Image (spheres, coloured by chain):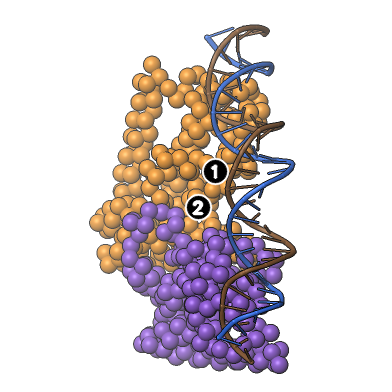
Chain colours: A orange, B purple, C blue, D brown
Amino acid sequence: MSTQTDNPERHERILDAAANLIVHYGFDKTTVSDIAREAGISKGAIYLHFDSKDALFEGLLMREVGRYNTRWFELIEADPEGGLFSSLYKNVLIALNESDFMSAIFRRDTRILGSYLRKEDNLFKQMGGGAIRHEFMAMMQSAGAIRQDVDPQVMAHIMNMLAFGLVSMDDIIEPTTIPETDAIIEGIAEMMDRMLTPEDRVAASEAGKAVVRQLRAQVENQVAQTNENNKETDA
Amino acid sequence: MSTQTDNPERHERILDAAANLIVHYGFDKTTVSDIAREAGISKGAIYLHFDSKDALFEGLLMREVGRYNTRWFELIEADPEGGLFSSLYKNVLIALNESDFMSAIFRRDTRILGSYLRKEDNLFKQMGGGAIRHEFMAMMQSAGAIRQDVDPQVMAHIMNMLAFGLVSMDDIIEPTTIPETDAIIEGIAEMMDRMLTPEDRVAASEAGKAVVRQLRAQVENQVAQTNENNKETDA
DNA sequence: ATATGACCAGAATCGTTAAATTAGTCATAT
DNA sequence: ATATGACTAATTTAACGATTCTGGTCATAT
């Protein structure tokens, strides 16, 4: 259904072209012909890969979310304190900040997301709003990765406020008065460390790693599942 | 200049009416006739108090900023830990959250602020964007009211991110998933306490109170100055 | 088989004009 | 003196067809 043609390389090139143009000009002002030209192919060829412009956008969305997840796991793995919740969250912010597309999604940028946002059944609502789900925080807490005396719901929300602020503030206040993004993220991470990390840091880190492994398996399983389903419906 | 008529009670009533209508319907959709009707007077009478619709709005803005400041000082005074920076900031959030008008300003709500925002010489730019000025943080730091090893510029920005998030998030994510505002503010305050308060809490609190007294004198002086100027130009 | 781009129907945009609204004034009334 | 609201000039909105644009298709070419 979603892909009628087997040509992964071109598939990616289309999405690359779309990502470039949409981040720059927005969904509404980016035409399918524009994307075709940017990808160096004909318009018809695009419809060999995607059923509609909306489907293309959703394909892009899925790819970017996937890349964002992958990048997050990568950052965690590379981080010596990767198991601590403060590091986990820090890496959320880094991954978020690295992706223009994810930043646009997170701030509900109507200029970029355009009319897709208005659709009733758009994918954003399903995904749930925030970067940090409070269910995940609760899991981390019962695993002992964060202090017992914090309210996971409240802290998850505060973290989402900060993530939202990170990608939104330069539209609001004079960008010249904003500190370096790295410094902001570092400051937030230290604050979260003081707020959330239990006394026993090594135990917390181990617990955190375990939960992340579990989450990762879950995510990868779900991705595999989705791919399987797509193949079936193609047949 | 700004007030041709001496009738403080009616002056206030006009601003009350304007505040109600503007917060509800926005600046553009609130007409001067609407305000007159709501205040129970004629349209002409409004022009005995204000030179123009814009001037009326600026009068409202000034009044609300003044009330916000007053309320903030009031909250600090009532707070047993009022001198601590975390309490100071907590009371900023409470005062901000109590005022629909200030919240709208802070989130740059174009629906409410309307065409006034587009004006070249609008008052917002002069006021500087944030609730927390990093110069103030630096003052507090050199007075010993906050820890020496934090970057005042970065922390001021983080605090503004949180203030922005507090008044913005319910436009962004499903409001039902947002915790109680009081709980959020409490959580933020505790986080800031862990991050900013020095070892010696009583000394910090005293130092904080001294800076606030200084700031308050400064603000009240400035207000008196402004009133003086207005009287002069009226003559 | 695979890819192209001319083509089409429907949607969005534009230019124009008419109608409605509104900020601000001022002759009149109190 | 003070306040009113009918009035006006100017702006905003609504209406409208004409025109362009764009998502999607498909006969044709490779």
Rendered location of residue B217, percent (x, y): 55, 92
Mark 2 neighbour density, 10 Å: few (under 14) some (14–19) many (20 or more): some
In the displayed structure, would residue B142 be above or below residue B195?
Answer: below
Residue at 63% from the left image edge and 23% from the top image edge? A41
Q: Which mark is residue A133?
A: none
Which corner quadrant holds the N terminus of chain A? Answer: top left
**Residue type, label 1:** Gly
Rendered location of residue A88, percent (x, y): 41, 54
Q: Nearer the viewer, residue A88 or B234?
A: B234
Q: Nearer the viewer, residue A68 or A213?
A: A68
Rendered location of residue B230, percent (x, y): 66, 88
Question: Along the polypeptide, which appears first: circle 2 or circle 1?
Answer: 2
**Residue type, label 2:** Arg
In the displayed structure, would residue A76 be above or below residue A178?
Answer: above
Q: Nearer the viewer, residue D4 or A203?
A: D4
Residue at 33% from the left image edge and 66% from the top image edge? B180
In the displayed structure, would residue C9 be above or below residue C16?
Answer: above
Kindly identify which residue carries mark 1: A114
Rendered location of residue B171, percent (x, y): 44, 57
Kindly identify which residue carries mark 2: A107
CA–CA distance between discs 2 and 1? 13 Å
